């Protein structure tokens, strides 16, 4: 039987050379991170970046996050201030993206950051991506490895399903966090543009100032364009108390019974586990051919705020 996932690469010393070769020759490849899987390209190569936008069918005004191995490399491209250093010390490497000013002589290609004067930078923690980043001489522009507006991938198989084997992907198992990074704006007013595992409370405790979540309206100038995001492609209804047997019912906590249409994000009511299971569950429901999804109310605290953010976007028509 043919292997339907012939594009999945195991990570070892031989494949490392192959991965580096692909990236160095302006190719693109799916890589694991602790948040979700990314579609990686050399951030210093316009050819490579264009391939990412085209494979994802992503609008050019939506900037990519640039991933670095360490501070020394990032410093060459961006301007970093004290606020940044405090946060970096506490949260990086990890699931947080900082929006900072781009240097005039930065080598990051303008199209990677949608011609903005700012750049989103992240230092991922996943061991595989760190080993690759350490060995290459350029940072990686890396959005989530899915077609624009669909659900982010949390396994190598998910990436294959998105791009139908056309893109190679390195297998790093299931993403540990399962939800995209927190995006924190550090240019002008400090605010969170996308909630994630690192919360407003976490940032407040480091900076000693109140932090708000302000959804990224300034960057995407056409309202509504990206309102529908993280979509499983079938209607999603939130804050439901029950569901018919025909609909997939996403629940949270121990009071729910088992059933063919019932998908519990976390029996023990653990929000981190729920985040990890969210996209996996939505893909499973889609594969099982359900036509509608109903979701119970998820506690709006800690990483639950990020879960609700993604669910709200998934439910937008
Ligand atoms: P994704 O690549 O799918 O994880 O999405 C990246 C997110 O980071 C999007 O919400 C972008 O709008 C945001 N982002 C990246 N760079 C910037 C930037 N320079 N300013 C504001 N938001 C950014
Ligand atoms: Mg994405």
Image (tube, grey):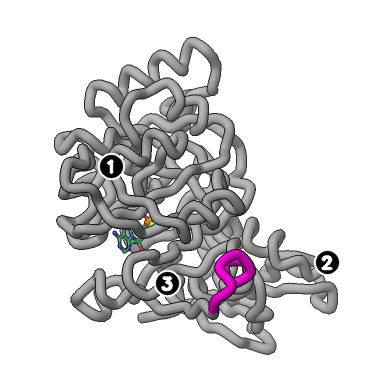
- Residue 151 percent across, percent down from the top left: 44, 59
Residue that appears at 26% across and 58% down: 118
- Is 205 included in the stretch rendered in magenta? yes
Please identify the quarter of the rendering in which residue 258 is found: bottom right
Mark 2 neighbour density, 10 Å: few (under 14) some (14–19) many (20 or more): few
Q: Residue furthest front?
A: 82
- Residue 230 percent across, percent down from the top left: 43, 65
Q: Is residue 164 visible?
A: no
Tell me the residue that label 3 is attached to: 190
Q: Nearer the viewer, residue 217 or 169?
A: 217
Please identify the quarter of the rendering in which residue 11 is found: top right
Residue that appears at 51% across and 69% down: 195
Q: Secondary structure at mark 2?
A: loop
Q: Quadrant of ligand 1?
A: bottom left
Tell me the residue that label 2 is attached to: 268
Tell me the residue that label 1 is attached to: 77
**What is the CA distance from the residue labelled 2 to the residue labelled 1?**
44 Å
The tag on residue 273 is none
């Amino acid at each position: 039987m043919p292997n339907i996932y012939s594009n999945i690469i195991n990570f070892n010393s031989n494949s490392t050379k192959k991965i580096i070769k692909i990236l160095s020759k302006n190719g693109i490849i799916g890589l694991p991170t602790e948040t979700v899987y990314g579609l990686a390209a050399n951030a210093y190569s316009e050819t490579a970046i264009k391939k990412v936008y085209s494979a994802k069918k992503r609008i050019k005004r939506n900037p990519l996050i640039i991933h670095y191995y360490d501070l020394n490399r990032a410093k060459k491209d961006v301007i970093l201030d004290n606020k940044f250093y405090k946060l970096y010390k506490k949260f990086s490497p990890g699931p947080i993206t900082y929006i900072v000013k781009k240097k005039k002589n930065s080598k990051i290609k303008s199209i990677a950051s949608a011609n903005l004067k700012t750049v989103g930078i992240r230092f991922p923690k996943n061991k595989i991506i760190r080993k690759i980043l350490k060995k290459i001489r350029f940072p990686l522009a890396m959005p989530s490895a899915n077609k624009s507006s669909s659900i982010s991938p949390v396994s190598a198989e998910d990436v294959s399903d998105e791009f139908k084997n056309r893109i190679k992907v390195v297998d790093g198992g299931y993403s540990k966090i399962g939800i995209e990074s927190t995006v924190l704006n550090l240019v002008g007013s400090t605010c969170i543009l996308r909630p994630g595992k690192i919360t407003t409370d976490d940032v407040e405790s480091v900076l000693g100032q109140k932090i708000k979540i302000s959804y990224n309206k300034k960057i995407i100038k056409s309202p509504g364009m990206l309102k529908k995001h993280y979509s499983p492609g079938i209607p999603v209804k939130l804050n439901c108390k029950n569901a018919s047997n025909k609909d997939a019912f996403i629940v949270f906590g121990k009071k729910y019974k088992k059933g063919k249409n019932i998908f519990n994000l976390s029996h023990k009511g653990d929000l981190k586990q729920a985040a990890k299971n969210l996209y996996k569950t939505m893909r499973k429901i889609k594969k099982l051919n359900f036509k509608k999804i109903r979701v119970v109310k998820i506690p709006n605290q800690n990483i639950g705020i990020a879960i609700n953010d993604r669910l709200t976007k998934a439910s937008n028509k």
